[in-house]
Image (cartoon, coloured by chain):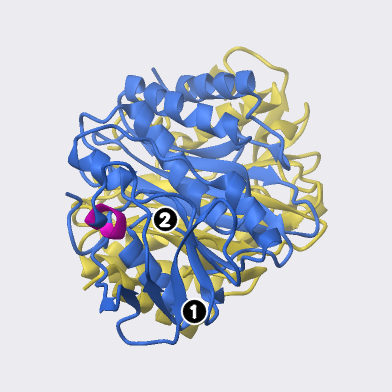
Chain colours: A yellow, B blue
């Protein structure tokens, strides 16, 4: 097996699923660069997320779960800005062709579900597998949801109950994240200007939102996934629900607190400071 | 040291060099996605390239050389399409803050030289360092140089003598690639429609160009870098010179042969088939 055969196989798979060109991608895999013709008037969104063995997955994780999750993480960032995903580039490092097949067996169905073109990438034969997925999305001009737009008195909400991922991790259960793209795209029209996705845990991520907006947050109620403890919901990562603020609560979502004046402790839960115990990539090992 | 401090340090460095926003990047590092407002009428180019320890560099390689080379490889792809680079996303995996500083000490001066905004990225604390650099560039609408546009009778040329990188590797010498961006941007106006960059060696890369264009190539003369043998020039990778075809020779570049009718052997050197002995990521280990 050589690189040309590997790429030809991926290309055939893309063609079968209609993911080779489209969404503005004129030339995809096969040249030095992908060529994209943007729709005028839209702003473009760019995000990239890596996954490494022993850091984001283990030797027992199915390659297809890595492929699904790698794309889902970047799509969740597009959802958090209120965008629509257009295309992805995949940098994949792995030496086992079976693992590579497995990766795409997880990646491509999710790409197809959200109409994401696979426009290009890079392959490298390394002994330990890793990947980096870049996604480009679009949003109507000036309508991206920003972390820095929370205003005093806003209701803070989340898109669903929290802690499911931390609970699954604790129980050794498999759980595939689902990016909240459909909801993300409706938020701007409902008056939301400030959003982010929950990847590192509510306590850590809400703190980042507060710092970006120069405000603090007072949490009153946090919806928990079935079986999840409060700790799972407050500090557990990988839920990939959306966190956002708005003047009024948004029907179908979960209000969890209020934006208050800036305070050094940033986030409060029932009047006590809530320390950011979520995931910091340079502090704690993933449990 | 935590992730927020690492990112704040990178941001301060970018601000000092004027690489935080601009070239259409409205919001860079600090939110879920970077926001880019494209200039209407231009096509956009996207490329991504990884570097892994023991695959693309060793434990004795300076981190700054990895940073420079990682960006240079992607910029070379933009050059090969005739584009202008606009911004980059960097996915960096490393646990040593000194190595991370070193990486950017090589990356940022090259970014500054070519006006490349660092719009975002991802950090991951892994024991062995690796990176993936995505670059977006622009090209006037419809004017991207493609591998598939070689025509019968075209002169095949390269932008400079070949084999310097292979020679340096053999001698254990340090050599930093320089992307041929300025030349790349002039080629379209001079009638060039077909180009690619030489990353894996002339024999392998010219074969790819021929397959994409459904033609063959007959080489007559290949300029060699000082001290390089013919083998270095024909098969050595990492030169990052441009390879292109045109109706007439382009002043200041090196004609090396002619585009001829398609033949199963693809590339000929002085009437003999030239096998693709260059670098295949899934075949041979880098020497």
Residue B137 included in the magenta stretch of the image: no
Q: Nearer the viewer, residue A238 or B108?
A: B108
Q: For mark 1, what is the residue?
A: B213
Residue situated in front as seen by the camera: A48 or B133: B133
Quadrant including the C terminus of chain A: top left
Residue range (magenta): B231-235
Mark 1 and mark 2 on one chain: no
Of marks 1 and 2, the one in the foreground: 1
Contact between marks 1 and 2 (CB within 8 A): the answer is: no
Q: Quadrant of residue A38?
A: bottom right
Q: Which residue: 30% across, 28% down? A: B95
Helix, strand or loop for disc 2: helix
Distance in Å between CA atoms under marks 1 and 2: 34 Å
Residue A242: tell me if it is visible: no
Residue B209, quarter of the rendered image = bottom left
Residue A125 x/y as whole percent? 24, 57
The residue pinned by badge 2 equals A70
Of all chains, the one bearing label 1 is B
Q: Residue at x 50, y 25 (%)?
A: B7
Q: Position of residue B230 (x, y in %)?
A: 25, 56
Report the front residue among B128 and A67. Answer: B128
Where residue A257 sits: x, y (%)? 66, 33
Q: In terms of secondary structure, what is the magenta stretch mainly?
A: helix
């Amino acid at each position: 097996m050589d690189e040309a055969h590997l790429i030809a196989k991926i290309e055939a798979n893309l063609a079968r699923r209609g993911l080779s060109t489209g969404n503005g991608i004129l030339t995809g895999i096969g040249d030095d660069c992908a060529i994209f013709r943007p729709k005028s008037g839209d702003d473009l969104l760019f995000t990239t997320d890596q996954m490494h063995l022993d850091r984001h997955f283990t030797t027992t994780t199915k390659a297809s779960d890595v492929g699904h999750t790698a794309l889902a993480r970047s799509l969740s960032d597009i959802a958090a800005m209120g965008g629509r995903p257009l295309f992805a580039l995949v940098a994949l490092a792995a030496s086992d062709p079976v693992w590579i097949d497995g990766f795409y067996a997880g990646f491509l169905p999710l790409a197809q579900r959200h109409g994401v073109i696979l426009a290009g990438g890079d392959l490298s034969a390394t002994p330990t597998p890793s990947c980096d997925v870049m996604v480009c999305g679009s949003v109507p001009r000036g309508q991206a949801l920003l972390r820095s737009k929370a205003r005093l008195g806003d209701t803070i909400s989340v898109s669903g109950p929290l802690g499911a991922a931390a609970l699954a991790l604790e129980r050794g259960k498999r759980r595939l994240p689902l990016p909240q793209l459909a909801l993300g795209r409706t938020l701007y029209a409902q008056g939301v200007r400030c959003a982010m996705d929950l990847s590192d845990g509510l306590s850590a991520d809400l703190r980042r939102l507060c710092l970006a907006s120069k405000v603090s947050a007072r949490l009153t109620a946090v919806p928990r996934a079935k079986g999840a403890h409060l700790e799972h919901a407050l500090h557990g990562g990988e839920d990939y629900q959306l966190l956002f603020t708005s003047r009024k609560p948004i029907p179908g979502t979960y209000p969890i607190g209020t934006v208050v004046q800036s305070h050094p402790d940033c986030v409060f839960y029932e009047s006590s400071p809530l320390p950011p115990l979520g995931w910091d990539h340079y502090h704690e090992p993933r449990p």
